[in-house]
Amino acid sequence: MARAKNPPASVPTLTEVVPSGAAPSSAKATQELLVTRVMQRVDLALERRLREAIAATILEQTRSITPLLRAEIEVVVRATVEQAFRDELAAQAGRT
């Protein structure tokens, strides 16, 4: 049987045993940092896109409701003016 030889002095050797739990802890910290950064980017992108989508929807709804609002306002203004004329004419008839 051959006997194991010591490596030459110029070859580095393992002098410390690293526990197997040390590497995953570092990997976990890196993974958590990556997740945090990705979530920040997603949050910013979602906020911007949602703001744009909401603005577009509000603009579209405003454009579609404007004619209906104008028609309703016209009816209300006409009725109010007619009532004011009737009241004024009645008041003038009562004074004479």
Image (cartoon, rainbow, N blue to C red):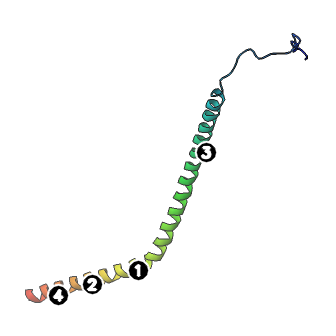
The residue furthest left is 95
Give the mark toward the camera: 3 or 2. 3
Q: CA distance from mark 1 to mark 2?
A: 17 Å
In the image: residue 90, left or right of residue 20:
left
Q: Residue at x 65, y 23 (%)?
A: 19
Give the mark toward the camera: 2 or 4. 2
Which residue carries the number 4 mark?
Answer: 89
Q: Disc 1 vs disc 2: Cβ atoms closer than 8 Å?
A: no
Which residue carries the number 1 mark?
Answer: 68
Q: Percent position (x, y) of residue 44?
A: 56, 49
Q: State the mark number for residue 38.
A: 3
Question: Dot 4 lies on which element?
Answer: helix
Give the mark toward the camera: 1 or 4. 1
Question: Dot 1 lies on which element?
Answer: helix
Q: CA distance from mark 3 to mark 1?
A: 45 Å
Amino acid found under the numbered disc labelled 2? Ala
**Nearer-N-terminus badge (3/4):** 3
The residue furthest right is 2
Q: Which quadrant is the C terminus positioned in?
A: bottom left
Q: Is residue 27 above or below residue 61?
A: above
In the image: residue 81, left or right of residue 21:
left
Q: CA distance from mark 1 to mark 4?
A: 32 Å
Q: Is residue 53 above or below residue 86?
A: above
Which residue carries the number 2 mark?
Answer: 79
